[in-house]
Image: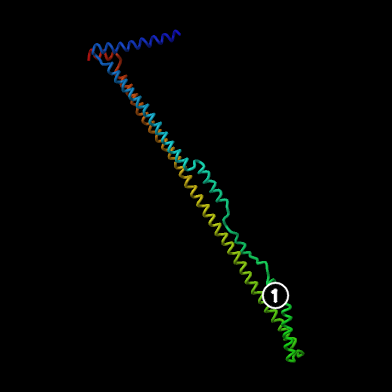
Amino acid sequence: MASTSLVNSLKKQNADYTIGQSAISDLTGLTNIGEKNAAYSNASDTLKGILGENSAAYDSILQLIQGAGTSTQDALGGSQSVSDWLSSVKDAASKDYSVDSSKLENYDYGKSVSDFLDPNADYNIGQATKAAQNSLAGQGGLFSGGAGEQLAATASEKAANLYKDAQQQYNTEKDFDYGKLKDTLGFEQSNRQTAMQQANNNVSNLGSIANEYLSSKQNTSDNTVNALLGKLSNDTDIQTALANLGISKASEGGFASQLLGGLFG
């Protein structure tokens, strides 16, 4: 308690002494300490006022920067835009858009010429042979030495013709089946290429949006840093001015030096 009272007393004495200095100087007209102190005080208050106003102005600027950045980023979908783009890239990379061409390379029709032989082939061959036999009989050559060979030739020719017909039908059906498979694979390949192009377009579109979002984030950060650096520079200039003002005031000297300077100046 005693120390506090002493300090307060010393402060009051110092204040009274300072007031006395100014009053005496002003009354004698030897110095103008009161006006100078007022000028220093006004200058200091002005600089401090500017410092406060600058702080408020920069706060408003930072809010505008952050607000504009947030609005743009929200319109682009926020951070989800980056997640969507990355997901589309992974999804596109995980899919196989190729077609298994081995189905054509290892094509197996699964049927043979015999599957196309006339089921009545034996009957038709018999009928042809019978007709030849009747013809020979009518000509009186049924029991000739060459009758057997002729009948065998007739049967063989008929069988060959039937096989030829079966071969042609087999080739026609096989070509059609192969062509149908080829067309099916062609359609499949076309559809997969379309799907791949759509996936690539989706990746590209989402990538553009994500890039816009990241650019906005970077621009907001850069503008914020630049604004803060500008505030720091301005604050430093004002603080320097305040410091110089204090140094200038201190360099004027105390009451005694100013009084003596007025007396003997």
- Say how the picture is coloured: rainbow
Q: Residue 188, how many percent across, how many down?
A: 57, 59
Residue 73 position, x and y percent, is 46, 40
When the figure is inspected, residue 263 is found, relative to residue 89, above or below; the finding is above
Q: Residue furthest top?
A: 2
Q: Quadrant of residue 169?
A: bottom right
Residue appearing at x 47%, y 40% in the figure: 74
The residue carrying mark 1 is 118
Closest to the observer: 232 or 256?
A: 232
Looking at the image, residue 136 sits to the left or right of residue 60; the answer is right
- The amino acid at mark 1 is Asp
Q: Which quarter of the figure is the C terminus placed in?
A: top left
At mark 1, the secondary structure is loop
Picture layout, residue 202 above or below residue 39: below
Q: Residue furthest right?
A: 143
**Horizontal and vertical percent position of residue 10:** 38, 10
Other-residue count near label 1 (Cα within 10 Å), few / some / many at <14 / 14–19 / ≥20: some
Viewer-closest of 201 and 122? 122
174 relative to 264, above or below: below
Q: Residue at x 44, y 7 (%)?
A: 2
Q: Quadrant of residue 178?
A: bottom right
Q: Quadrant of residue 176?
A: bottom right
Residue 258 lies, with reference to residue 175, above or below; the image says: above
